[in-house]
Amino acid sequence: MDFITHHPVLVVSLVKIALLLFIVLTALAYLTWFERKLIAHIQSRWGPVEVGAHGLLQPLADGLKFLFKEDLTPPGADQFLYILAPFLALSLGLTTIALIPFGPPDIQVLGQSVFVVANVSIGLMFVFAITSIGVYGVALAGWSSNSKYPLMGGLRSSAQMISYEVALTLSVVGVVLLANTLNFNTMIEGQRGYYWHFIPRWNIVPQIIGFLCYFTSAIAETNRVPFDLPEAETELVAGFHTEYSSFKFAMFFMAEYANMITVSSLATILFLGGWLSPFPDSWTFMRYLPAVGLLLLAAYLIYDTFVLARGIAKIQLIVISFGALAIALGCLHPLVLNIIQGPFWFVTKIGAIMFFYVWMRATLPRFRYDQLMAFGWKFLLPVSLANLVITALIKVWPLLVGHG
Amino acid sequence: MSVVPISYYLVLSAILFGLGVIAFVFKRNIITIFMAIELMLNAVNLAFVAFARAHNQLDGLVFVFFVIVVAAAEAAVGLAIVITVYQNRQTLNIERIDTLKF
Amino acid sequence: MSLPFLVFFVCAGIAVLGALLLILAKEPIHSALALVLVMISLAVLYLLLGAEFIAAVQIIVYAGAIMVLFVFVIMLLNAGSEERTDWSKMAKYAGLPLGIFLLLELGHWMFHSAIGKEIANGSVAASSSVSTVEMSKMLFNQYVFPFEATSVLILIAILGALVLAKRDDQ
């Protein structure tokens, strides 16, 4: 106990990191389920329904499959780099989660803020630093496989990533100009309040061009459709992760989703107001929204259990639905309700952006590689620069007019 | 908590610079020689930042910023030259490209 | 051993290890990755010295862009992987001892010079970090001319690299 009171930073940080890792890894696994279900429903089919009720145990089955597959190394591959590349990709994808605030900083345990692991004063720059090292995971994976298609896929993919990184960084500078700071919590606090009493003062409203440039660059940065030529099946077998099997392939897979989560949380913080609620604080009944949402989910699951499901799915659904009911009723407790407000809105906004990501994957065709690079350098970069110049001009206008 | 004295950083900078010189003199691949140059520049940057902290002035940090930018420009042009040399001589070994005569 | 000392020695050890790997590696791509390791450990040392903006710039520009360029060129050219590691007699018996003597001498004179003594004995400034605001004020007020000059320099470098890397038959 003495140790805990003498070293509050260390103990609280370790607990936060452990919890956060557990939650994020589970979220990564269930993102795969979410994507498969959503694409399936858009394409008028069911998706995973066999394993567990509604296919909810599918990620578990996939994980077991990856663990039991044969793990082979291509002949002539560079051993050290072959093993290093997926580790690098996954660990860098998970590191940025430490910088992201999930809720307001005033909820504290032992004097340390609960919802952010590292509240760095230049948090934005460090997130970009970590994503720029993420290019090595892709490049080294392509190189160390000692084979033509992965090498070409790796080179193309990493060239695409560094090209769109420039547009990504420039499209964010407008937000930094508006917020006067690089710290995430301060940026979110600056987005409180309303324009004309009903539009929230989120940065997406003044910086709509910046948001569109950022979102497009983010899709290209994470190698998703419509920018995923380097890993398309019909073009390059599977791109830079062709020669990887079993758990290393699973690590690349998880690294892609971790990058998606990072980029979405950055979009939420910078443009969509982070953990702020879109409703005014005076509407106190809106604070019950998480509990209401969970109650509706529990009601649907109970209906599903007793009316629709058959066989073993019934038992699983009973467990899940009563679990959801218990959590919903637990949320009605005032202490829990206070704590859960920030993370609920943050996760909702990230969920909305993920929905867009998966929706685009289901509907859009992909760009050709030269079209992709031309779009990045010849269109997105000038537009981001123009956005930056216009924002700077608007910000300095009072000074210019005052002197003239 | 006591703070690390600045002389420790300067000794580390000297060691890295010395290792950079050794790599520059003894390696045969052009690209590895370029990387030794970058190592030397990094050692100098460390000395600049250490002195900026010692005298509590920001000029050292601004100079480090400029050194990084100039190193980027130099690396870009230098590697373009290396690619051209490779296209003409098909080798990256400096012992085989030390004559102007083809 | 307090925490700053521990972090310093760990990062200094990793930096020297990376530099040694740069010299001793047989393949150029391993040397490139060793240099990336050196740069990242130097960025942590900059953080320890309170220069957080410079640490971020070091990782974004040096480790994340310049070294990626090196790695690309090594992968594209794919040459020089079988580097002979036996040096000439002159290098082995005279060169290596002289090289080690050079770095020991540099370290000695750094430690025992007048400036080194003054810094080692004098009190070091309080460990507060430099904020980005102060640094940008200095960059845009006092050093604005070198700043604009480096942007022209980067433009020249882009044009030079484009011209040099074009194929001859176009």
Image (cartoon, rainbow, N blue to C red):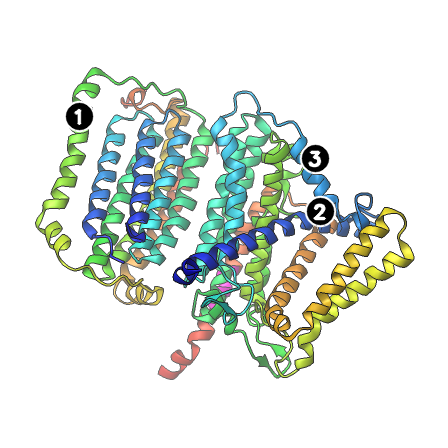
Rendered view: A170 above or below B32: below
- At horizontal 14% and vertical 54% (from top left) the residue drawn is C119
* Residue A128 drawn at (x, y percent): 47, 54
In the image, are marks 3 and 2 on the same chain?
yes
Q: Chain of mark 2?
A: A
Instruction: State the residue lying farthest toward the front.
Output: A1
Residue carrying label 3: A65
Rendered view: C126 above or below A50: below
Residue A387 inside the magenta-drawn segment: yes
Left/right placement of residue C116 relative to residue A226 reads left
Q: Chain of mark 3?
A: A
- At horizontal 47% and vertical 63% (from top left) the residue drawn is A173
* Residue A205 drawn at (x, y percent): 59, 72
Residue carrying label 1: C97
What secondary structure is found at the residue carrying circle 3? helix
Mark 2 or 1: in front is 1
Nearer the observer, A192 or B62: A192
Q: Disc 2 versus disc 1: distance between alpha carbons?
A: 62 Å
* Residue C61 drawn at (x, y percent): 39, 49
What secondary structure is found at the residue carrying circle 1? helix
Q: Disc 3 versus disc 2: distance between alpha carbons?
A: 30 Å
Q: Is residue C162 visible?
A: yes
Query: In which quadrant is the N terminus of chain B drawn?
Result: bottom left
Residue A58 inside the magenta-drawn segment: no
In the image, are marks 2 and 1 on the same chain?
no
What's drawn in magenta, residue-wise? A384-390
Q: Is residue B65 visible?
A: no
* Residue B32 drawn at (x, y percent): 34, 31
Left/right placement of residue A367 relative to residue C77 reads right
- At horizontal 42% and vertical 31% (from top left) the residue drawn is C29
